[in-house]
Amino acid sequence: MAEGWATRFVSALLDQYIVVLLGYSANDPPVRYLLQGLHAGGQGRAVRLFAFDSGAQEEVQPRWRDSGVRALAYPSTDSHTALWSTLSAWADRADDPLAWRRTVVDLARRGPRKLSPHERGQVASLVRTDVGAKLFADADRPPSGEWLCVFDHRVRYGDIGRDPVGAQPDFDPLLEYGLDDDPARPANSTVPSEPPSLFSLLKPHFLNVFAHASRWGWSDEAFLRLHEFLVLACFWRRKNSAYVSYDEARRALQETNDAGRAHSIDFLNHTVLDGDPKKWRRFGKPFVEKACPREDRFRTEETSRRFADLVENAGDMFPEVVRTISPHLIPIRKGGLFAIPLGQGDLAADDAPATRFPDATLALIDKLVPDDPDQVPYKLDLVVEAIGEAKPSLRQDSRWRRLSRVVLNP
């Protein structure tokens, strides 16, 4: 059989096509002999040879496992309804590929979390091709930026979000964004290795979105997730150059609006860095210095608030963090800076920033507090006095004197 005409015929087919066996059983003698002949001739091609078989996946796979065929399971019914529906959908795609692609883009407009895994898989399959990716990106009503969470396996296999008080259900990104062919979440929580091929293909379109997203009528959640993904894609660049560089992130942040820039800083602080000194040195500081725009038109009260929050968990790096964020700060007048971002404890304690780092603390609050704030920040008087106590020579500094006047003349 290894040298027979049937073996040579099927082998030639496998050189040119993907072959799907329909209406055959793994135990049919002709099929069994044919597959044995392919293997005997060293011509097995498991990734190009498939077979439809009825039954649950765990039942079907063992039947074909030793034959070098990838089984495609479908539900068992008397009339094989699922099989015929699948073949009908394949025929529609083959008859008019463009119409099928447009149907998938329409499906994508519903948002990934409203679709089933196999529907998300259809969208992912579409954007793996140059033609499909362009159609997806250039659509008149572009699908939500939340699709980026589907297109990158690092997001799909991200940590499960849990509400600490149990008021909200857990958020498992693999359930919300997973594809039908994704393997189960590994027991050791490691992310399965996968080249960022989808993101690489869509990256130019992804970066172009930031100039238009605020006008597209996306939900707030989708708009903010777009910016979260930008920060993550820049973070992942450290291990794979296919992701977003600091220069690319900066251009994207220049093109978005103030709410997007502010949320990017907040996400950087509370999710990516999360008070980790090593992450600050390796990524937080370079991101602020190289990716965050410094032009005057981008320095706003809202972004200043978010930058100032970075000092909350700075610890021993407090002076370094202050120096890094200072070029991005402006005084916060509208609505008031309710509290100086120096922690919730005794602001004059021995381990408080004002006591440990009086120069850096003075530099920070001088940047943030205007001469005539709508509301004097809470406990500003205690912080100013703690600075003077820690380093009496600063009482002669013009910045310390100005802040003292703000405290005395609210």
Image (cartoon, rainbow, N blue to C red):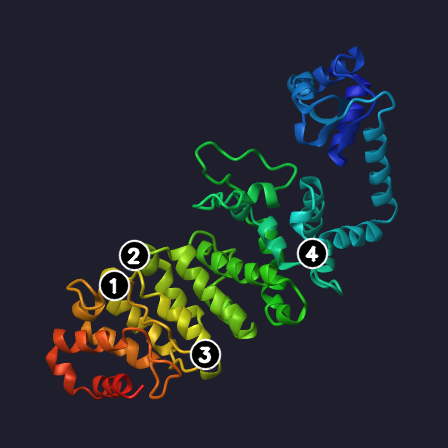
Tag of residue 133: 4
Residue visible at 68% across and 68% down in the picture: 216
Among the two numbered marks 3 and 1 on one chain, the one whose residue lies closer to the N terminus: 3
**Is residue 165 visible to the viewer in this orientation of the structure?**
yes
Classify residue 365 by image quadrant. Answer: bottom left
Task: Assess whether mark 1 and mark 4 are in contact (beta carbons under 8 angstroms).
Answer: no
Image position of 193 (left or right of 68) = left
Kindly report which numbered mark, 3 or 2, lies closer to the viewer in this rendering. Answer: 3
**Which residue is disc 1 drawn over?**
317
Q: Which residue is mark 2?
A: 277
Q: x, y percentage for residue 70? A: 68, 26
Identity, as a three-letter code, of the amino acid under mark 1: Met
- Residue identifier under label 3: 300
Q: CA distance from mark 4 to mark 3?
A: 36 Å
Q: Separation of disc 2 and disc 4 at Cα?
A: 39 Å
Horizontally, residue 380 falls left or right of residue 205, namely left
- The residue under the point 45% across, 37% down is 189
Q: Position of residue 32 (x, y in %)?
A: 74, 14
In which quadrant of the rendered image does the C terminus lie?
bottom left
Residue type pointed to by label 4: Ala
Residue at left offset 34%, top offset 71%: 339
The mark nearer the N terminus, 3 or 2, is: 2
Q: Nearer the viewer, residue 360 or 202?
A: 360
Of tags 4 and 3, the one toward the viewer is 3
Question: How far apart in space, not on screen, are marks 4 and 1 (Cα)?
Answer: 44 Å
**SS at mark 2?**
helix
Q: Disc 2 or 4, which lies upstream in sequence?
A: 4
Taking the spot 85% from the left edge, 28% from the top edge, the residue there is 81
Mark 4 and mark 3 residues within 8 Å of each other at the beta carbon: no
Label located before the other in sequence (2 or 1): 2
Which mark is drawn over residue 157? none
